Image (cartoon, helix red, strand yellow):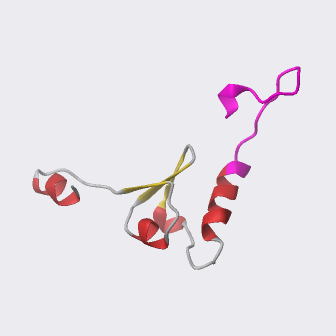
Amino acid sequence: MRDIVAKEGGIPSRLALFPKSKLSVQNSELALVLDTIIESETINTENPSWATDLYRSVLALRQPSFTSNGRVNSSDV
């Protein structure tokens, strides 16, 4: 697909969807992790637990709010 887009004059970019392998990160410019897009070059895949660390770092950015009965607001999920 990338070659077809380039042939037609477009600028292709590859997006790894919920990456779980080093190869998917290395072969993409961007990665979709949960609801966050990250530049693939910023993902350190040398650490054996890179995938777990990546998902944890994205989850840590979230600050869920709670309703009066202690439940998480669905808009924060």
Give the main secondary structure, helix, strand or loop, of the magenta stretch.
Answer: loop
39 lies above or below 47? above
47 lies above or below 27? below
Residue at the spot x=78%, y=30% of the render? 72
45 falls in the magenta region = no
67 lies above or below 31? above
Q: Pick the quarter of the image with the N terminus.
A: bottom left
Residue 13 location (% of width, % of height): 32, 55
The furthest residue to the left: 8
Residue at the spot x=83%, y=22% of the render? 67
46 lies above or below 61? below
Residue 75 location (% of width, % of height): 66, 27
**Count of numbered labels shown in the rendering:** 0
The furthest residue to the top: 68
Q: Quadrant of residue 51?
A: bottom right
71 falls in the magenta region = yes
Q: State left or right for residue 48 relative to residue 24.
A: right
Q: In which quarter of the image is residue 47?
A: bottom right
Judge by depth and name the residue closer to the eye, 61 or 4.
Answer: 4
Residue 29 location (% of width, % of height): 39, 61
Q: State left or right for residue 73 relative to residue 66.
A: left
For the record, the magenta segment spans: 59-77
Residue at the spot x=45%, y=66% of the render? 25
Q: Pick the quarter of the image with the C terminus.
A: top right
